Image (cartoon, grey):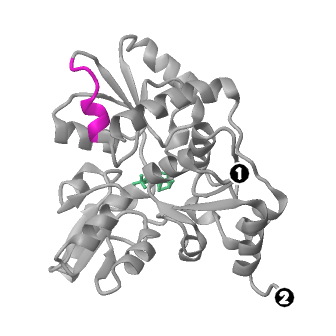
Amino acid sequence: MPVENIEDRINALRKERGAVIFAHNYQRGEVQDIADVVGDSLELARRAREAEAGVIVLCGVHFMAQTAAILNPQKTVLIPDVNAGCPMACMVSAKGLKEFLAEHPEAYVVSYVNTTAEIKAMSDICCTSANALKVVESVPADREIVFLPDRNLGHYITKTTGREMTLWEGFCPTHERILPEFVEAARSAHPEAELCVHPECAPSVVDMADFVGSTSQILRHCAESDRESFIIGTEIGILHTLRKLAPGKEFFPATKLADCPDMKLIALEKIFWALRDMEPRVVVPPEVAERARGALERMVEITG
Ligand code: 13P
Ligand code: SF4
């Protein structure tokens, strides 16, 4: 039978290689549609940890592929575009963190998963936006917490739990494009809609929200809510996921400017090439991976 289109070619290669395709909720619609698993950072990490397939194609950004490689070191992890990085993860270097921690020698280091493997290896525990509250609540009350790199998520955790933390001044450039005035305009245009935002947004935007959560928590909330329309304050790739999950409901972006260029580097052709050539592979040096795994496994132990 002739192989006619890119999806058929990917499907044939996926079978031949014994591969699974994982996609983050911010991926292009066509990439989400071909994936075996679509999820938030936590779900992708958990599924990677349990994956039995020999090859994982991670359609997301570099730290997500590293996390999969760390949690399941026997597997081959491919990222279809090696340039898909996360600017927030690049805002903390090993050297910078070492110098910072010299000023906070007793601190307990909580790292958002949006960090490199080297930073995870220097951390006591990791968290994602889905479990950050639980992770921070698990830290003994008498310990100083250094939270990095996302100051906005850190601010949200402190506001919600009352737990003071020393924050790294990192941020997501895509979420910081969601300005309060854009949200106001969307609310005036859709006064009946519920406002759902990601905690990577600036505090001024989070304070306006009816619901705050990780990408998959936003998805579940919108699907289960009695409301019929929603303004979404996070990266716009999630609108595809939402419209598929709840086709009868209406979803409006807080701003179309919230479009992460790194997430959008992944395309069907690149998935095909990755499966054909079995590269680019994401390999974490074993000594770094071992220490980083400790911080990730502690997160999984606490939050399931
Ligand atoms: P979550 O899917 O965990 O909410 O992550 C958001 C994000 O910005 C990932 O880069
Ligand atoms: Fe990084 Fe923000 Fe893009 Fe997520 S949306 S990958 S946090 S820049």
Magenta-colored stretch includes residue 11: no
Say whether disc 2 or disc 1 marks the residue closer to the N-terminus. Answer: 2
Q: At x 50% / y 53%, what residue is drawn?
A: 44
Please state which amino acid type lies under the numbered disc 2: Pro
User: Residue 268: horizontal and vertical position, in percent?
Assistant: 68, 72
- Front one among 213 and 195: 213
- Look at the picture and state if 133 lies above or below 231: above
Left or right of 118 in this view: 18: right
Does the Cβ of the disc 2 residue fall within 8 Å of ligand 2?
no
Q: Secondary structure at mark 1?
A: loop
User: Residue 288: horizontal and vertical position, in percent?
Assistant: 63, 26
Q: Quadrant of residue 266?
A: bottom right
Q: At x 48% / y 34%, what residue is drawn?
A: 296
Residue 54 disc label: 1
Does the Cβ of the disc 1 residue fall within 8 Å of ligand 1?
no
Please state which amino acid type lies under the numbered disc 1: Gly
- Look at the picture and state if 225 lies above or below 298: below
Residues in magenta, as a range: 133-141
- Front one among 17 and 135: 17
